[in-house]
Image: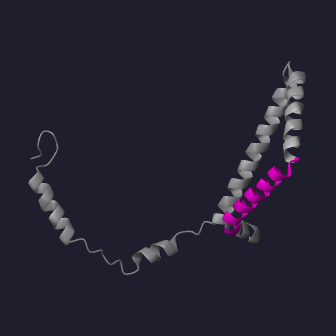
Amino acid sequence: MEPANLIPPDDRDAELDAWLRERATPLADLGFSARVAAALPAESRRRVARERFWFAAAGGCVGVVVALIAIAISPSAGDALHQLDQVGGYVAAQFADPTVLLALVFAAGSVAFVFRKRALRLLVR
């Protein structure tokens, strides 16, 4: 019978641990796992990655369109566009700085290096 607090006595824990340790050898599956894995349908990871990319790209485009529509129908659209123009000028001035361009090139190169194998696999198929 289980104790009221559902915690077994310590002596049973030690006994169970000893029993499990002495029988800790892995079971031989005689190739069963490999046969099961081979029988599973092969879902293309590339296809899934491409679908994910296109869903993300479509979602991004929809988000941009919704934001542009919201700006266009806003009563203060003129003020928002003026502020956007000021921000755009500031950003353009930052990109004119050669150190910022050099940092962006190194960052893009680093990202390309990290994901080179994955990108090549997606481009091949």
* Residue 121, horizontal then vertical, whole percent: 70, 70
* Residue 39, horizontal then vertical, whole percent: 51, 73
| Colour treatment of the image | one colour
* Residue 53, horizontal then vertical, whole percent: 71, 54
* Residue 48, horizontal then vertical, whole percent: 65, 60
Quarter assignment of residue 28: bottom left
The residue at 12%/39% (across/down) is 4
Q: Quadrant of the C terminus?
A: bottom right
User: In the current view of this chain or complex, which residue is farthest to the bottom?
Assistant: 30
Quarter assignment of residue 45: bottom right
Specify whether 45 is left or right of 15: right
Question: Does 3 appear in magenta?
Answer: no
Question: Does 110 appear in magenta?
Answer: yes
The span picked out in magenta is: 96-117
The residue at 80%/50% (across/down) is 100
Specify whether 39 is left or right of 61: left
The residue at 15%/56% (across/down) is 13
For residue 60, say whether it is visible.
Answer: yes
Q: Nearer the viewer, residue 31 or 67?
A: 67
Q: Nearer the viewer, residue 117 or 4?
A: 117
**Is residue 12 positioned above or below 69 on the image?**
below
For residue 115, say whether it is visible.
Answer: no
Determine the main secondary structure of the stretch shown in magenta: helix
Specify whether 43 is left or right of 51: left
Specify whether 11 is left or right of 17: left
Quarter assignment of residue 112: bottom right
Count of all numbered marks drawn on residues in the image = 0
The residue at 49%/72% (across/down) is 37
